[in-house]
Amino acid sequence: MKNKHFYIFLLSTLSLIFIWSFINPHDLFTWFLEVLPAVIGISILILIYPNFKFTKLVYFLIWIHAIILIIGGHYTYAEMPLFNWIRDTFDLSRNYYDRLGHFAQGFIPAIVIREVFLRKSVVKNGKWLFFIVVSICLAISASYELLEFIVSKLTGTAADNFLGTQGDVWDTQWDMLYALVGSITALLFLKKPHNKALAHEKN
């Protein structure tokens, strides 16, 4: 199987990190909510693999995103130790790990969506592709914020760690902005590497 060792590395390392994250998480309910998107996403990739294989670049990016989610689930996004150290060292107002997560929420899906659109000939490579991909990424971010809102309303204080506003009344808007910036950044800086990866898959 082509790229067998690459796939084994991604799945095995992700499995080990997942197991670690389940051991004594900060809050089990928050852990479940945070890792669920990663579990669903990986499951879908495995199910569609026989019929649709992404480029190695996309799988690698998804691997990174899944790790961000899983680590966030273990510590909660407001208490990730490395970013607590950064906050305290540089006298910042908050733990910015959640901002990294929302940047990734735009950055990684942008390349995933771009690949699907190009390979399925949904939209040609150009300005419209850029606009549509960015719009979808922003819609995904807004949908996730609505999901956080619904879960918070249904479960009350049990979802405080999942909501993770850290006292910022504009947290939702900041989250969507970071996802927007992430999607634009990915399309600007990964366009050429992604095109190269797509061309390589055809050969």
Image: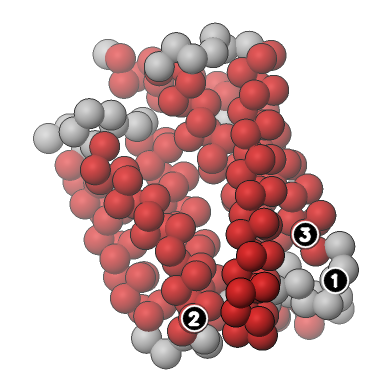
Marks 3 and 1, how far apart at CA: 9 Å
Q: Quadrant of the N terminus?
A: top left
Give me the C-alpha separation between circle 3 and circle 2: 21 Å
Q: Quadrant of residue 54?
A: top left
The residue singled out by tag 3 in the image is 172
Find residue 178 and report its horizontal and vertical position in percent.
Answer: 74, 50
Q: In the drawing, does residue 11 fall left or right of residue 196?
A: left
Relative to the observer, which residue lies in front, 65 or 151? Answer: 151
| Residue 157 visible here | yes
Q: What colour scheme has been applied to the protein in the rendered image?
A: secondary structure
Dot label at residue 29: 2
The residue positioned 51% from the left and 31% from the top of the image is 113
**Mark 1 to mark 2: distance in Å?**
22 Å
Going 68% across and 65% down the picture, which residue do you hit?
A: 149
| Residue projecting furthest to the left | 1
Q: Residues within 10 Å of mark 2 (few under 14, many from 20)?
A: some
Q: Quadrant of residue 190?
A: top right
Q: Amino acid at mark 3?
A: Thr
Q: Looking at the image, is mark 1 or mark 2 earlier in the sequence? A: 2
Cβ–Cβ under 8 Å for marks 3 and 1: no
The amino acid marked with disc number 1 is: Asp
Residue that lies at the very extreme toward the bottom in this rendered image: 24
Please give the residue where the numbered disc 1 appears in the rendered image.
168
Q: Quadrant of the C terminus?
A: top left
The answer to whether residue 134 is above or below residue 92 is: above
Residue 182 visible? The answer is: no
Are circles 1 and 2 on residues that touch, CB within 8 Å?
Answer: no
User: Circle 1 sits in a helix, a strand or a loop, which is it?
Assistant: loop
> Which residue is pictured at 30% across the width and 51% down the height?
43
Q: Kindly identify which numbered label has been placed on residue 119.
A: none
